[in-house]
Amino acid sequence: MKNKLISLMLGVAASMALAGAAGAGTMDDVRQNGFVQCGVSQGLMGFSIPDDKNNWTGMDVDFCRALAAVVLGDATKVKFTPLTAKERFTALQSGEIDILSRNTTWTMSRDTSLGLKFAGIMYYDGQGFIVNKKKFPNIKSATELAGATICTQSGTTTELNIADYFKSHKLDYKLLTFDKNDEAISAYQDGRCDAYSTDQSGLYAQKLKFAAPDDHVVLPEIISKEPLGPVVRQGDDAWFNVVKWTYFALVNAEELGITSQNVEELKKTSTDPEVQRLLGVPNADGTTAGFGTGLGIDESWAENAIKQVGNYGEIFDRNIGEGSPLKIARGKNALWKNGGLQYAPPVR
């Protein structure tokens, strides 16, 4: 009995050691390299897009910057790797990138068969269609696209969504797919297809790029659920927890009214226990609740992200909301207390 107990204890200890080794990998790499290697799109307005000097902006970009602020204390310590839809998962699986933050939809197959984990939902989206009004001057609905040729990017969820939609409505269609999104859009502009389909946020972003935006209309139907969020590798729980709680911290900060402008003042003056816990305010005896310690990072982790990048609402507003050219309404992406779906567990 004694030998069995000793063997059991040794087995548990070995398992814990292996788990610890697996969980430390990416965090150690990031600290050793001095930056977060972030996989992003090749250019999608509002989410991840470079300017002519290769300065990246967007919601997905800002999330990686917040993560760098959390882990390294500096939101500028990020390198961006632009990836096609086909390349993105392989790049993460191979370790080429530390995190995939690339308008990627959380699905069951991706969650269970690719060795990957989704760490949250940064944006609740849905797939739609855009058409040229000169081709369809009176179109009101996607149900009027019978026999149409649809352009989209290959390697994404859009192909299956289109198939499901047209089958359920008993409509014929033709599909043209392209490896690169720019190729699909060019085909649409050249008239090789009747409609272009992707997430609605992407449709509104693309419409602004057209020479004559008013010639195009985004149809009202949303034909799918597209929860978009950051992705990491399975088997690295320490890194997964940091990524997950970075997202939760941004959402909690907005709910608590903590912004990039007032975070330093609130850390000094707030008596709200939730604010104090999130910002790592020391107790009267000089100790802290240790939430940063539990993640293996500094106690000022959330403060650094909020101060340098902003809360979830600030990130949303400047990239795709009212403070941006897209001016997308919060809708489902409003906080839960405002009728939306953005909800984070408490720091407690």
Image: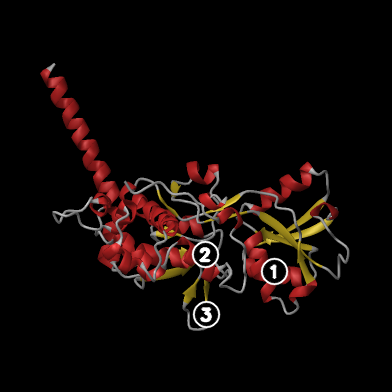
Q: What residue type is labelled 1?
A: Ile
Residue 148: percent from left, percent from top: 83, 57
Q: Report helix, strand or loop for mark 3.
A: loop
Among numbered discs 1 and 3, the one appearing first in the sequence: 3
**Callout 2 crowding tier (Cα within 10 Å): few <14, some 14–19, many ≥20:** many
Type of amino acid under label 3: Asp
* Direction from residue 239 to residue 16 in the image, left or right: left
- Front tag of 1 and 2: 2
Q: In which quarter of the image is the N terminus?
A: top left
Residue drawn at 17 percent across, 29 percent down: 9
Q: Distance between the residues labelled 1 and 3?
A: 19 Å
Q: Give the camera-side residue of 91 and 98.
A: 98
The local secondary structure at tag 1 comes to helix
223 or 276: which is nearer to us?
A: 276
The residue at the point 80 percent across, 70 percent down is: 191
Residue type highlighted by circle 2: Phe
Is there a contact, CB below 8 Å, between mark 2 and mark 3? no
How far apart marks 1 and 2 lie (CA) works out to 25 Å
Residue carrying label 3: 51
Q: In this view, does 243 lie above or below 181?
A: above
Q: Which mark is residue 185?
A: 1
Location of mark 2 (residue)? 316
Q: Does residue 211 sit above or below 42 in this rendering?
A: below
**x, y percentage for residue 103?**
54, 59
Badge 2 element: helix
